[in-house]
Image: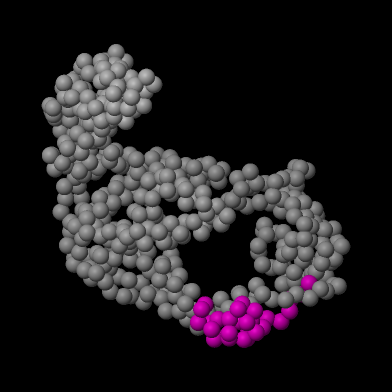
Amino acid sequence: MQVNETVNEGLKRTIEVTIPAADMLKKRDEKLVDLKDKVRINGFRPGKVPMSHVTKLYGKSAMGELVNEEIDARTKDVLAERKEKAAQTPKIDMTEDQDEAEEILDGKKDFAFSISYEVVPPFEVADFKELKIERPVVEVEDSEVTEQIERIADGNRTYETKKGKAADKDRVTMDYVGKIDGEPFEGGADNGATLVLGSNTFIPGFEDQLVGSKADDKVEVKVSFPDDYGAAHLAGKEAIFDVTVQEVAKPGKLEIDDELAKTLGLDSLDKLKEIVSDQISGQYAAQTRQKVKRQLLDQLDETHQFDLPEGMVEQEFDNIWNQITGDLERAGKTFKDEDTTEEKAREDYMKLAKRRVRLGLVLAEIGEKAEIQISEDELQRALMQQVQQYPGQEQQVYEFFRSNPDAVAGLRAPLFEEKVVDHILESAAVKDKTVSKEELMKEDELPL
């Protein structure tokens, strides 16, 4: 076998491999000898089929299998001997000439192919002890717990039918049909819908026009859908809703006591307060984690500068760009609506792609050196979380992951990343800092 390097430019490598026809024939014949004792051919007793006949029937298919096996084996050998790690799956190029391919399958021509890849760049991992992280902390106030419980109580409030006109806070039960230019539109009709006036759950202006209505009234409600409305075909459009009021009901007294807790399956109001407090704490903890992770990744990005594999950057950019443009298309928006241009957006998302690739390589190197592993139990828990998001389709989801290695890798990657982050934080200088709720919940300009 001959191995020649033809490209060595930056991170790019191309290796040409040539396996003599004689070597390929020898390995093919070994396959056929093994096959000879297994095949069943009419007119021949098992194990008594002449090799010439086996070769005639199965020679090309055996050589085809051998070609794939040799590509896989020689690619691994080349990388191992060169002590290089491919950034992505190497690209294999073989002859496209049909006559030449037939000669290779017949063992009349040497088998030659090229392996093209980019290597994972060498770099030194920064000292974790130099990383300085401020962990934002927010204490849960009693007032927050009270506000949340009031919202829960309001959602469980009872209503009593009234004969008078609907006022703010009253609940209206109604049928309605929405029309644009006189034509009903999809999703614009409902029967027996309930609406608490003043809750701001319907289109702006809709609820105000029902104030003063009473049971059996027919009300023509005129509204304009907001320009940023989620359904692109309705955004900015004027609509008329023909509303028939069925019932007007006034709200009952807001009761916050043990009885409220019991309607929720809890023993007491104190237990409800405890659960609500824990939920708020959990929300704050998740946001704190994101802020800490952002700081850590920002500092890792700043302290690691090295050449990036172009293929990885292009693939990451394409993934980001397809998601962004897809989201805009579904929302019926353009880059102008987002106060930017396509050129500026491409520039920003290319920076994000490079950041993600760089950090991915750094975290992978740290995780490898720390021998961080994802256990089968951890992977199964992640899979269960995915399955639970699709009630009624559990079996299909299981089958999807069972037959899709890339999907399993997609589950493993974030678990691995979080473990590496935890490993780094064990050595980094982390200091708690009390902040306001608003500061903690403020969103970052760009995703991680």
Q: Residue at x 71, y 50 (%)?
A: 188
316 displayed left or right of 208: left
Please say if 48 is above or below 197.
Answer: above
Task: Pick out the residue farthest to the front.
Answer: 45
- Where does the magenta region start and end? 249-276
33 vs 347, nearest the viewer: 33
Q: Residue furthest top?
A: 99
Q: Say if 13 sits above or below 163 in the image.
A: above
Q: Is residue 257 above or below residue 51?
A: below
Q: Quadrant of residue 56?
A: top left
Q: Quadrant of the N terminus?
A: top left
Please tell me whether residue 258 belongs to the stretch shown in magenta.
yes
252 displayed left or right of 105 = right
Place residue 12 in its image quadrant.
top left
Residue appearing at x 86%, y 61% in the figure: 217
Task: Tell me where residue 106 appears, x and y as whole percent.
Answer: 26, 17
| Image location (x, y in percent) of residue 252 | 73, 79
Residue 345 image-quadrant placement: top left
Position of residue 94 measured from the top left corner of the image (x, y, whole percent): 26, 24
Q: Decide if residue 352 is on the left or right side of residue 208.
A: left
**144 in the magenta segment:** no
Residue drawn at the location 16% of the way across and 50% of the way down: 123
